Image (cartoon, helix red, strand yellow):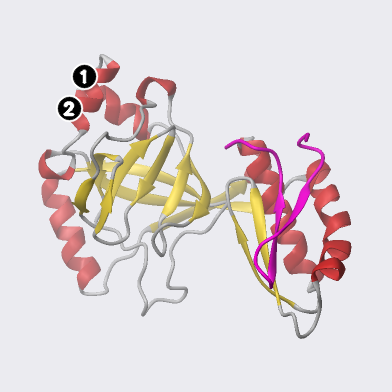
Amino acid sequence: MTDAEPRFLPFGDAALLVEYGRRVDRGLSARVLALDAAVQDAAIPGIVETAPSFRSLMVQFDPLQTELGAVVERLRPLAEQAVAERSDRPARIWRIPACYEGDCAPDLDEVAERAGLDRSAVVDLHVGQDHHVYMIGFLTGCPYMGDLPAEIDFPRRKEPRVRVPAGSVAIAIGLTVIYPADSPGGWRLIGRTPAALFDPAAVPPILLEPGDAVRFEPIGARAYERIAVAVAAGDWRPERIDAVELAGAL
């Protein structure tokens, strides 16, 4: 299989996957996002929902309105076109504050030691780029973002934690995630944000979406507490920076 040959795979009795390649890659992500945008624009009868992932797009359909073969027939030209065109939609850039101090960063010293760097150098590497949101998964609103600089690209912890606090900024396998709720987890915790990534009362309830970019901004413990109080009161949300062309970042 080559990247130019999308695969159409049944996914249960009312969905399919359109898969590009077999790796985590910004180019493949761009194709997935381009296909997602094309499907939305086409408004194909019977398609209920789409969900982008690292290298595939899940397309759910209503089996009372259509069937798998008909959906594949409609999607095939869109999928092949996405290989050439990718996505030219604007990327939303979010400025997300993160505290890289004390209890907010329990694994930062270990990461720094493994990298042969000091704490501040690890933080500089992490905040020194915009993190591309590949997909949302695991927990509601949890973004999988890449790509980490090679200097801090390490595997997961050997022993997962039973509880990772909500807002934890964690790294592993070349990626960054933000835990939107308390959860078990095995990624390395290097910071924490007071921002709420999932708020059922907000519109939309999930802050980030695939194709967005996150720009982390380091804050101290006092600023973290101040923002956390404002978030709990419903008086603070992250700032969205002016959009840039996603194609220009690839």
Instruction: Where is residue 246? Give x, y as percent.
Output: 63, 45
Q: What residue type is labelled 1?
A: Glu
Question: Where does label 2 land, which residue?
Answer: 109
Does the magenta portion include 159?
no
Does the magenta portion include 17?
yes
Going by the image, does 166 lie left or right of 25?
left
Relative to 205, say whether 219 is above or below. above
Instruction: Where is residue 48? Give x, y as percent.
Output: 68, 76
**Which residue ends up furthest to the bottom in the rendered image?**
64
In the rendered image, is residue 89 in sight?
Answer: no
Question: Where does label 1 land, which residue?
Answer: 113
Which element carries disc 1, helix, strand or loop? Answer: helix
Q: Residue at x 78, y 35 (%)?
A: 1
Which element carries disc 2, helix, strand or loop? Answer: helix
SS majority, magenta: loop
Relative to 83, say whether 58 is above or below. below
**Which residue ends up furthest to the top in the rendered image?**
116
Instruction: Where is residue 185? Give x, y as percent.
Output: 28, 48
Q: Are marks 1 and 2 in contact (CB under 8 Å)?
A: yes
The disc at residue 137 is: none
* In-front residue for pair 196/233: 196
Mark-to-mark CA distance, 1 and 2: 6 Å
The span picked out in magenta is 1-24
Q: Which amino acid does label 2 sit on?
A: Asp
Relative to 123, say whether 31 is above or below. below
Q: Residue at x 68, y 71 (%)?
A: 13
Mark 1 neighbour density, 10 Å: few (under 14) some (14–19) many (20 or more): few
Going by the image, does 49 lie left or right of 44?
left
Residue 92 position by quadrant = bottom right
Q: Which residue is drawn at 33% across and 35% down?
A: 156
Q: In which quarter of the image is the C terminus?
A: top right
Residue 11 position by quadrant = bottom right
